[in-house]
């Protein structure tokens, strides 16, 4: 078990290193970030001075070595826009993103999973059909459009909720609902099919035949056995929630990592982009590791190697 | 219920294709033609069924031409990713030596990053515009095909008829393209149909965030992005392009589900 976790952590390090290298290569091959960042009326010697200060005049191999050397110590350089340490900027934004993503994930689990279970157990009832329609619609509705429509309804028309920003619980409602909507649809759908599959198994028939109450049949025998595909997808989705957060944070002016990344890309502020890429890929792979560890706990037949 | 979903999928997809193909015949207006006298007219105004935007451009025309752009991007991206991802997966599954391992590691690296963020980062770096958004989405999306196809090939090539053909001395390329590929094709089609809607939604999201297709080109994502400034005065600018996008995605999703149930019920994407 310990060996497994260690080898997975080593793999994580390798994957993060490779993705940073890929982004570094793309950034450096795509043109001159300095020229894009300078005012129009600047003198050539000032440009050169700025380039020399940031080390853009060195050979690419030297720049790469310096970048890797800095990155392992958590130093991604200075933001071109804010003239500040890029890592610090990213770290500042992390709590807001965790709050948003965490709320959305909880919302997903407390709405989508029960909905999926009830849909499966009460199959082909009105409730099941309503649930199916809701999940199909939820999956097709783009988050940024849902966000705009909610702003129109709750902020412009009803004036119940703020259009964006942060600070109170009211600010958190719309962003987390939008972020949760898409994922809830997928997870509810998968929960339904996973529970249906287990309900067809012979051990469920046995459990019912020996007179077990329906609550125990569903609560214990069914749920535990249908948990694996649900946890798998929830893990994959937890990573994708970071992608969804990019869009949601931009719509609702939520000061998180996603919005910072979009702005850094728009401004070609590449030290910040690289620091953000680093954090996103670390979080994503760690979430997947936790999911894999959960399998072993949910299903002791699975041996982790 | 199942038939209903399939028919709804076919109907919505057909409507989107119809709108894209017939756009110039369905509306008399040019989607780029500004007319400041007519700006921000609400839906139902004479001559403008869905109203007009801040520059007085006809919204219906822009939504219909937006279908053109969305479907074009979707088709190109799906073809590119299916071709390259499928081919790489085919070879990786068939050869099983070091190139295969390298390819799958590259896939792992790509999958350690959310799809939309990857496509957006690539797009920000390679540049804006139609060609580049198609390239970015393809560069981010080929992995799914490579994975699915490789897995399928690994199982198909163990089957007796492939072994028998190999024992008869059939050349490797003939074996690959005559016996393995046709048996993998259904899953490629299913993945393509399921990926299609995620590509058009991703394109819209990326254009919405300010990359990808730029105004004044009538793309649904950039129209929604512009509509944010007018949300207080003109809800229709946000409502209709988004509804068109959602309905198209819904139609293609339902069609994809139906294709999967018919061709390859066990496939999970």
Image (cartoon, rainbow, N blue to C red):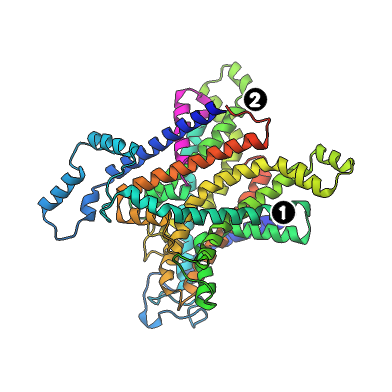
A67 sits to left or right of A185: left
Query: In the picture, which quadrant includes the C terminus of chain A?
Result: top right
Q: Are marks 2 and 1 in contact (CB under 8 Å)?
A: no
Percent position (x, y) of residue B93? 53, 28
Q: Which mark is residue B2?
A: 1
Percent position (x, y) of residue A279? 41, 45
Please state the chain letter of the residue tagged with numbered disc 1 in the rendered image: B
Per the picture, the main secondary structure of the magenta-coloured stretch is helix
Decide: few, some or many residues near mark 2? Use Cα within 10 Å; few <14, some 14-19, many ≥20. few
Name the residue rendered at 55%, 44% in the picture.
Answer: A236
Q: Earlier in the sequence, mark 2 or mark 1?
A: 1
B240 sits to left or right of B267: left
Q: Quadrant of residue B2?
A: bottom right
Percent position (x, y) of residue B166? 58, 19
**Which residue carries the number 2 mark?**
B159
Q: Is residue A286 above or below residue A176?
A: above
Q: Is residue B203 visible?
A: no
Percent position (x, y) of residue A96? 45, 56
Element class at badge 1: helix
Q: Which residues are magenta?
A: B92-114
Name the residue rendered at 52%, 22% in the picture.
Answer: B172
Query: Which of B12 and A142 lies nearest the eye of the viewer?
Result: A142
């Amino acid at each position: 078990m310990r060996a497994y976790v260690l080898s997975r952590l080593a793999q994580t390090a390798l994957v993060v290193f490779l993705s940073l290298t890929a982004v570094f290569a793309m950034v450096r091959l795509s043109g001159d970030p300095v020229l894009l960042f300078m005012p129009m009326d600047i003198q050539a010697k000032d440009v050169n001075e700025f380039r020399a200060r940031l080390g853009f005049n060195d050979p690419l191999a030297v720049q790469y070595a310096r970048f890797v050397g800095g990155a392992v110590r958590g130093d991604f350089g200075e933001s071109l826009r804010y003239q500040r340490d890029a890592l610090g900027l990213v770290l500042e934004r992390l709590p807001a993103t965790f709050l948003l993503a965490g709320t959305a994930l909880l919302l997903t689990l407390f709405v989508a999973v029960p909905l999926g279970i009830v849909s499966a157990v009460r199959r082909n009832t009105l409730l099941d059909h309503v649930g199916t329609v809701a999940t199909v619609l939820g999956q097709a509705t783009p988050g940024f459009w849902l966000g705009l429509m909610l702003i129109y309804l709750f902020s412009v028309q009803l004036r119940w909720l703020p259009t964006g920003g942060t600070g109170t619980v009211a600010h958190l409602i719309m962003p987390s609902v939008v972020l949760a909507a898409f994922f809830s649809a997928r997870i509810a759908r998968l929960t339904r099919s996973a529970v249906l599959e287990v309900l067809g198994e012979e051990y469920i028939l046995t459990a019912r035949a020996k007179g077990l109450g329906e609550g125990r049949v569903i609560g214990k025998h069914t749920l535990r056995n249908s948990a694996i595909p649900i946890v798998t997808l929830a893990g994959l989705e937890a990573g994708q929630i970071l992608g969804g957060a990019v869009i949601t944070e931009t719509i609702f002016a939520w000061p998180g990592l996603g919005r910072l990344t979009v702005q850094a890309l728009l401004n070609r502020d590449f030290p910040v982009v690289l620091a953000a890429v680093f954090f996103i890929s670390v979080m994503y792979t760690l979430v997947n590791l936790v999911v894999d560890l959960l399998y072993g706990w949910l299903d002791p037949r699975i041996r982790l190697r | 219920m199942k038939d209903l979903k399939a028919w709804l999928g076919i109907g919505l997809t057909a409507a989107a294709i119809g709108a894209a193909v017939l756009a110039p015949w369905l509306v008399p207006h040019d989607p780029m033609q500004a007319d400041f006298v007519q700006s921000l007219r609400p839906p139902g105004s004479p001559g403008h069924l869905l109203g007009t935007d801040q520059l007085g451009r006809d919204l219906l025309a822009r939504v219909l031409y937006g279908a053109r752009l969305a479907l074009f991007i979707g088709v190109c991206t799906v073809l590119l990713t299916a071709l390259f991802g499928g081919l790489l997966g085919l070879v990786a599954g068939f050869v099983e030596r070091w190139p295969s391992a390298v390819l799958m590691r590259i896939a792992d690296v790509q999958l350690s990053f959310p799809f939309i963020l990857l496509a957006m980062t690539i797009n920000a770096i390679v540049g804006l515009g139609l060609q580049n958004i198609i390239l970015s989405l393809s560069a981010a999306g080929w992995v799914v095909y490579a994975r699915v196809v490789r897995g399928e090939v690994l199982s198909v090539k163990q089957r007796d008829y492939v072994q028998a053909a190999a024992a008869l001395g059939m050349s490797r390329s003939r074996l690959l393209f005559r016996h393995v590929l046709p048996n993998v094709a259904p899953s490629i089609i299913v993945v393509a149909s399921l990926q299609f809607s995620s590509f058009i939604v991703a394109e819209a999201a990326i254009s919405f965030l300010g990359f990808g297709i730029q105004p004044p080109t009538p793309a649904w994502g950039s129209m929604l992005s512009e509509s944010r400034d007018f949300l207080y005065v003109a809800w229709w600018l946000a409502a209709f392009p988004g509804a068109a996008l959602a309905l198209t995605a819904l139609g293609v999703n339902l069609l994809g589900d139906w294709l999967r149930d018919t061709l390859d019920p066990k496939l999970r994407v």
